[in-house]
Image: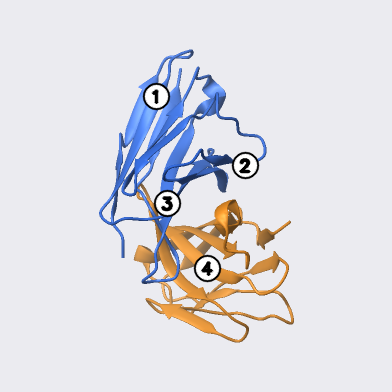
Amino acid sequence: SAVISQKPSRDICQRGTSLTIQCQVDSQVTMMFWYRQQPGQSLTLIATANQGSEATYESGFVIDKFPISRPNLTFSTLTVSNMSPEDSSIYLCSVADSLTGGYTFGSGTRLTVV
Amino acid sequence: GDSVTQMEGPVTLSEEAFLTINCTYTATGYPSLFWYVQYPGEGLQLLLKATKADDKGSNKGFEATYRKETTSFHLEKGSVQVSDSAVYFCALKGTTYTGANSKLTFGKGITLSVRP
């Protein structure tokens, strides 16, 4: 199955700043998904990123706050902009895995905003 | 829309006890169903899956059967180990495989602690 390298693994950021999270996949994939896992909560999809087109955002998430890039079929970034303490979460990227029929996740980025 | 409901946690068991974690879902058509596990400090890993009614997914001693009539996908293990301590998420993928509709919908997750 696909292997995803996600970084940084964790960061502590000042409010008002931005953080860019990177995900590199070891194979070409059509869609990449970005999720947020708030403390003690489940995973919520932020957006779906297709190569060559704008990301599709879920209700409650906007491009100005969470801009996404997808420059090629193996790489994507998610930026958390103008951060506030409410953005403290784990952010994960994911791709569909044709071998398992499931989805593979990156190891996550644990973000703390102070 | 699609939704997944998991039993409330946390769950604490003694080693070798029997485990059942309940999961029910709401979805149109015939979704695919998954169990994911998140060990402490790690990312999510696919534990098992089922893609159609009456399918049984199994892995590492865990099993779950896709029950269309009760819209359930309960996770079971006959004898848990300390190493099974983790957070378990039930999830579904809708039947419309286009764009954002390919997303996974997750339950809230349940923390399992197994004591020696």
Residue A19, position as x, y percentages in the image: 39, 24
- What separation in Å lies between label 2 and label 3 (alpha carbons)? 15 Å
Same chain check for tags 2 and 1: yes
Circle 4 chain: B
Front label number (2 vs 1)? 2
Of the chain colours in the picture, the one used for chain A is: blue
Element at label 4? strand
Which residue matches tag 1? Answer: A19
User: Mark 3: few, some, or many residues within 10 Å (few <14, many ≥20)?
Assistant: many
Which residue matches tag 2? Answer: A58
Residue B10 visible within the image: no
Residue B25, position as x, y percentages in the image: 69, 66
Along the viewing direction, whichever of B102 and B40 lies nearer the viewer: B102
Which residue matches tag 3? Answer: A94
Task: Identify which amino acid the numbered label 3 is placed on.
Answer: Ser
Circle 1 chain: A
Residue shown at the point (42%, 30%) measured from the top left: A111
Residue A113, position as x, y percentages in the image: 46, 21
Q: Earlier in the sequence, mark 2 or mark 1?
A: 1
Along the viewing direction, whichever of B88 and B12 lies nearer the viewer: B88
Circle 2 chain: A
Along the viewing direction, whichever of A48 and A88 lies nearer the viewer: A48
Residue shown at the point (50%, 17%) measured from the top left: A82
Circle 3 chain: A
Front label number (1 vs 4)? 1
Task: Identify which amino acid the numbered label 2 is placed on.
Answer: Glu
Q: Earlier in the sequence, mark 3 or mark 1?
A: 1
